[in-house]
Image (cartoon, rainbow, N blue to C red):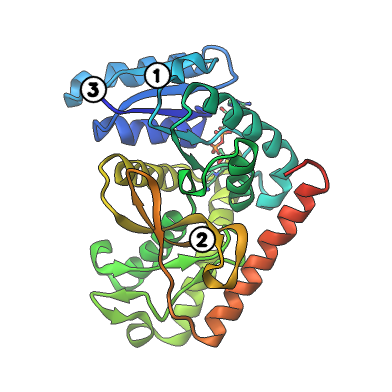
Amino acid sequence: MRNKVSIIGAGMTGATAAHWLAERELADLVLVDVLEGMPQGKALDLQEALPVIGKDVTVVGSNGYDATAGSDIVVITAGLARKPGMSRDDLLITNAGIVSKAVEESVKYSPDAIFVILTNPLDVMAYLAMKVANLPPNRVVGQAGILDSARMRAFVAMELGVSVENVHCYVLGGHGDEMVPLTRHSNVAGIPLREILSPDRLAAIVDRTRKGGGEIVNLLKTGSAFYAPSVAIAQMVEAILKDKHVIVPAAAYLSGQYGLKDMFFGVPVQLGRSGVEKILEYRLDADEASALQKSAEAVHETVAALSKLVKI
Ligand code: TXD
């Protein structure tokens, strides 16, 4: 029996995630969207691409949730994306309604699924997903850290002219401008970034990483990044389906780790067949700890804003 992955929201990130997943022949796929014909059309197009690359998975598009029944993983990308000048938090109210409904419907058909959340504001949407469906914390994980870390890796690789394979970066915290690139733990072939880059070049890369999403929004003008976010989804789905126990930065439910609790936040997470298997804790210095606190406060403020409007 093949694995089954449903993606709710067949827009730019959802459909591109389906592309990466089909290419890796990881699971049968279902694309769900509110737009009539759109998920069906994208699914059929993708299905028709697979003979060329010799991959055998089925791809189905639907406007309803029946087709998602028995999914191992449900990926939620449904919702609005940022336009130039908008912050991720500007999407809060609309996306809260969309994500709540998507999760509630999905759970009816796939009660044992693991949920991978992408919709922004990410940390708050992951929290909302867990609450509305009363899911155990290990079965909800938010994607942000792989993307933010990949952006930093790309910038370092470009700066130094080395392979991206040699660049290891770790970005923690909330998926917002207060995210925390851990420069002390990031390295090129084991050499700490601080030893290989001048302080001002490193500071510039940290700043560009933090604003990486906005940089793409400003260039695209009609949507936000989708290649890098969607390949990050594929990495998480693969880690879960293959029970890899891989450690990635991702938004997970904290119950005291890093001195934080009852919130989703970007931390190193070990992913396997049961979802979030473990949360790892870095030993942080005072500056890193206070940057993480600042980022956590930004997430808390968004949760507080949401809780004034809906019951969570
Ligand atoms: O790293 C991350 N977490 C992010 C998150 C990186 C990139 C994008 N990020 C967020 O994901 C972004 O801010 C948005 O909140 C979501 C989706 O971004 P995407 O770029 O895929 O947006 P699109 O192309 O507009 O697609 C969204 C789709 C679109 O086709 C809508 O018709 C659909 O969502 N939609 C719905 N589908 C199902 N059910 C409902 N209710 C619904 N409402 C809208």
Q: In the rendered structure, which amino acid carries the disc numbered 2?
A: Gly
x 59%, y 18%: residue:
35
In this figure, which residue is indicated by the disc labeled 2? 266
Which structural element holds mark 3?
Answer: loop
Which is in the foreground here, disc 2 or disc 1? 2
Q: Is residue 85 visible?
A: no
For the residues labelled 2 and 1, the Cα–Cα distance comes to: 31 Å
In this figure, which residue is indicated by the disc labeled 1? 43
x 45%, y 46%: residue:
229
Ligand 1 within 8 Å of disc 3? The answer is no
Quarter of the image for the C terminus: give it.
top right
Quarter of the render that holds ligand 1: top right
Relative to 286, say whether 235 is above or below. Answer: above
Relative to 261, say whether 282 is above or below. Answer: below
Q: Residues within 10 Å of mark 1 (few under 14, many from 20)?
A: many
Q: Residues within 10 Å of mark 3 (few under 14, many from 20)?
A: few
Residue 237 quadrant? top left
Relative to 305, say whether 96 is above or below. Answer: above
Q: In the rendered structure, which amino acid carries the disc numbered 3?
A: Met
Ligand 1 within 8 Å of disc 1? The answer is no
In this figure, which residue is indicated by the disc labeled 3? 1
Q: In the rendered structure, which amino acid carries the disc numbered 1?
A: Ala
Q: Earlier in the sequence, mark 3 or mark 2?
A: 3
